[in-house]
Amino acid sequence: MRSDLIFGALTHVTNRYQLCQLASKATRKLHKPNTRLQDTTNEVLDRFKDTVPMDDASEAPVEKIEVHQRRAA
């Protein structure tokens, strides 16, 4: 059932609004033509149950760029 998948995904994402946003973005990216949208959504929620979708280790490192301050004359 989908409610079991949602409650399983809430173990890693505590904010329900954020879970909906992440699930909709992931469903759009993972959906394949000629398959049911419901099946793709269930697959996404099942993945969220097993892994942390907002893990910082999965993001690309951001380089820090120094900005030099200009002084007024």
Image: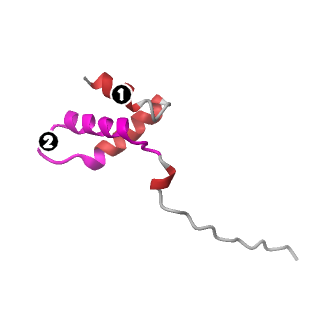
Of the 4 image quadrants, the one containing the N terminus is: top left
Q: Is 14 placed above or below 59 here?
A: above
Magenta stretch, residue numbers: 28-54
For label 1, the residue is 6
Q: Is residue 36 magenta?
A: yes
Residue drawn at (29%, 49%), measured in percent from left and top? 29
Residues at discs 1 and 2 in contact (Cβ within 8 Å): no
The outermost residue toward the left is: 34
Q: Residues within 10 Å of mark 1 (few under 14, many from 20)?
A: some
The total of numbered circles placed on residues is 2
Closer to the observer: label 1 or label 2? Answer: 1
Question: In percent of the image, x 49 and y 54: which residue is there?
Answer: 57
On screen, residue 31 versus residue 61, left or right, reads left
Which circle's residue, 1 or 2, is located before the other in the chain?
Answer: 1
State the residue at coordinates (29%, 42%).
27
Q: Indicate whether 33 appears above or below 12.
A: below
Label 1 sits on what residue type? Answer: Ile
Identified at 64% across, 70% down, the residue is 65
- What secondary structure do most residues of the magenta stretch adopt? helix
For the rendered model, the colour scheme is: secondary structure
Q: Residue furthest front?
A: 50
Residue 11 x, y percent position in the rendering: 44, 30
| Element class at badge 1 | helix
Residue 55 appears at what percent x and percent y?
48, 47
What amino acid is labelled 2 in the image? Thr
Where residue 16 appears, as percent x and y from the top left, is 45, 29
Query: Looking at the figure, which quarter contains the C terminus?
Result: bottom right
Above or below — where is 65 with respect to 53? below
Q: Which mark is residue 35?
A: 2
Q: Identify the secondary structure beneath mark 2.
A: loop
**Left or right for 70, reference 64:** right
Where residue 58 sits in the image (x, y, percent)?
Answer: 45, 54
